[in-house]
Amino acid sequence: MSSSSPASEIVKAVGGPDNIASLTHCATRLRFQLVDGSVVNTPTVEQIPGVMGAVPQSGDRYQVVIGGAVTTVFNDIMGLPEMAHEGQPGGSAGRSDAEIKAAARSGGPRGKFSWLDSFFEFLSDSFRPLIGPLLGASLFITFMSLMATTGVIGNWADPRVPLSPSWQFMNLTWKTVFYFLPLMVAYNAAKKVGADPWVGFAIMAIVMLPGFSALKDVAHQATIAGSQVDIVTIFGAPLTIFDYGSQVFPPLLMAAVLGPLWRGLKKLVPENLQLIFVPFLAMLIMLPLTAFIIGPIGVYAGAYLAKGLSAVNSVSALIFAIVIPLVYPFMVPLGLHWPINAIMLLNIQTLGYDYIQGPMGAWNFACFGATAGVLVLSIRAKDTTMRQTATGALVAGLVGGISEPSLYGIHLRYKRIYPSMLVGCLIGGVIIGIGGGLHTSAFVFTSLLTIPAFNKIPLYCIAIAAAFFASMTMVLIRDYRTPEQKAEALAAKNATEAADAAPAAPVLPGAHADATAPVSPDVTAVSTSASPAAAGGVDTATRTLTITSPLVGRALPITEIPDPVFSTGVVGQGVAIDPEESTVYSPADGTVVTAPESGHAFGLALDNGVELLIHVGIDTVELGGRGFDVKVKAGDTVTAGQPLVVFDKKVIADAGYSNITPVLVTNGFAFAEVTGTPADHVDTSTPVITVTTN
């Protein structure tokens, strides 16, 4: 391959092979993890033939937008001689894209503190998939709290207070999640370290069996670190009996040991025997190791961390209430809030209440208030993309208590927000501290719906309202954009308004399909019609093609896609579908060009010459296929109406991503015009894109 090829130019423009830590791709973009992202000159990259755009990102990550040819360019780059050197991604020739991604995540160069990055990622991926059940359980808890507050039942959180069988059952609706939380964490953590997640689940399950707890009846008490514990002798070795319900430190430690053991066993056991003996040997070693050593260490580690925080709270509730909301904005992006969440659960199990969630509420509502400020400013500026992003993030926060959509979607992109948000955190924390702190008897996501779960409801309401409106006011005063960003936004707005004000192109005669040759939408999604010149035998080249929607929902202009790569038309023109249903269909007969295992995007070469990209949601490649049931593969021939993928909208939304699905013509340069047609409701028979041939 010549040194002047686009692949070679891209490698050179991003700093050369030595600057590439890892390289993967999705449906339209090359995703680089660079050693030093500051050396890349984006205008230079964008001038390379075949490059549609470039997107610098935080953490030395860099995306190069290629479009439908991304797989070809990726393979060309990986085939360059300079990329085959030891230590470079090119040295991974022969591995699948999924294997390369796994290697990049687990073992690729990640900077000076790579172990710390891996640790944060391990914590985050062990807990993040559990947001759904935890949120559901927290709302059950809120309902029980509301019933107790209104006097319908007694103190539901106190096991000494008798409840009727009906209300005992209601209590089980949230206990099922928290009691078996160690098993869920064990599954996720084992999967994260590359072991069989069900083996991790089974290993952790031994200490949660009723038979394990029953050993307490034949145990004797001993004093360890000042605490009375139950010990039973098993084959001459002391086994400590704990209640592992709601414990999360033991499964995390267990998975941390299981990961390297699993990889070691796979190296030792012949490949044709691994299916049987790797799980068996892993369980043979890890079951007793977890019960005798890892489990107790995890319990004590959590207990000592909880005691440390309790000591700070005991010395000064005011200081504690101020520190927690001020450090949380920095802990959440790093994943460090998950161990604190584990301590909250431990406090509830051991003390019967938790004192951290009240101050944490001040941070959450300061975060949501900052998002509300961004929403107001985006409405004033008529910034459709930011308005949509802020609206979704604000609803997720106020109703669900989830801060990640606000943080990752807005706050970390616009650094001016953080000082404004910290003002709200400080004010809310001071109010809680002056009021003597707050308690809750259960783990909840701090949202509007979970207010009744706290013991001093008026104090809590005043604190979170002050945090919310203080942050919102500060954002309105200071703005969330720098002067340069405001100028860029204004220029983009003016350009859009000028384009909208331009006179519409005249409609050519023959723009509608010939009524004498109707095309059923159930049979084909593309109709063609000859121009008058063609009818006269002079020019047969001009045709109008209509492409129907690949899924049911609302058709939006691409400017409303919450991703600048798509919304600016860099990838192509078309529409965005806000889905109402969860199946994506092929809009016409054609061939599947791209169909990654993640299921998040599909490239189709339609029989009429149109190349179409259907990208299910925004940034959904990060889900790694979770929530996607792919029905086709690259190279398949498809017909109009054939399912391509079934996806779970809730999984996408819960992960903080948008369900909006760009449907774009990626070879628009081959046609005279590509026009999207927005509509309040479309189905698979509704034309949403019109393509006029040259």
Image (cartoon, rainbow, N blue to C red):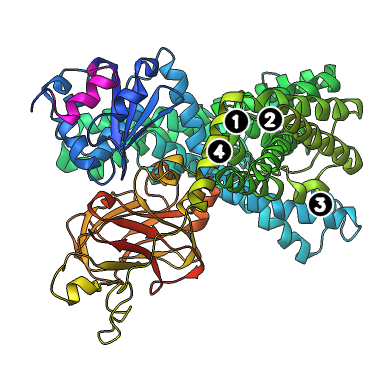
User: Magenta segment: does it hold 119?
Assistant: no
Secondary element type, mark 3: helix
Tell me the residue at 48%/49% (across/down). 499
Q: Residues within 10 Å of mark 3 (few under 14, many from 20)?
A: many
Label 3 or label 1, whichever comes before in sequence order:
3
User: Disc 2 to disc 4, how far (Cα)?
Assistant: 16 Å
Whether the residues at callouts 3 and 1 have beta carbons within 8 Å, the answer is no
The residue singled out by tag 2 in the image is 479
Whether the residues at callouts 2 and 1 have beta carbons within 8 Å, the answer is yes
Judging depth in this view, the residue of 191 and 266 nearest the camera is: 191
Q: Nearer the viewer, mark 3 or mark 1?
A: 1
Q: Is residue 640 left or right of residue 421?
A: left
Label 2 or label 1, whichever comes before in sequence order:
2
Q: Nearer the viewer, mark 1 or mark 4?
A: 1
**Mark 2 residue type:** Asp
Tell me the residue at 24%/45% (across/down). 275
The residue singled out by tag 1 in the image is 486
User: Disc 2 to disc 1, how far (Cα)?
Assistant: 9 Å
Label 1 or label 4, whichever comes before in sequence order:
4
The residue singled out by tag 3 in the image is 145
User: Disc 2 to disc 3, how far (Cα)?
Assistant: 38 Å
Q: Is residue 226 above or below residue 351?
A: above
**Mark 3 residue type:** Ser
The range drawn in magenta is: 4-17
Q: Of helix, strand and loop, which mostly describes the magenta segment?
A: helix
Residue 376 place in picture, x, y as percent: 71, 42
Q: Is residue 607 left or right of residue 523?
A: left
User: Magenta segment: does it hold 15?
Assistant: yes
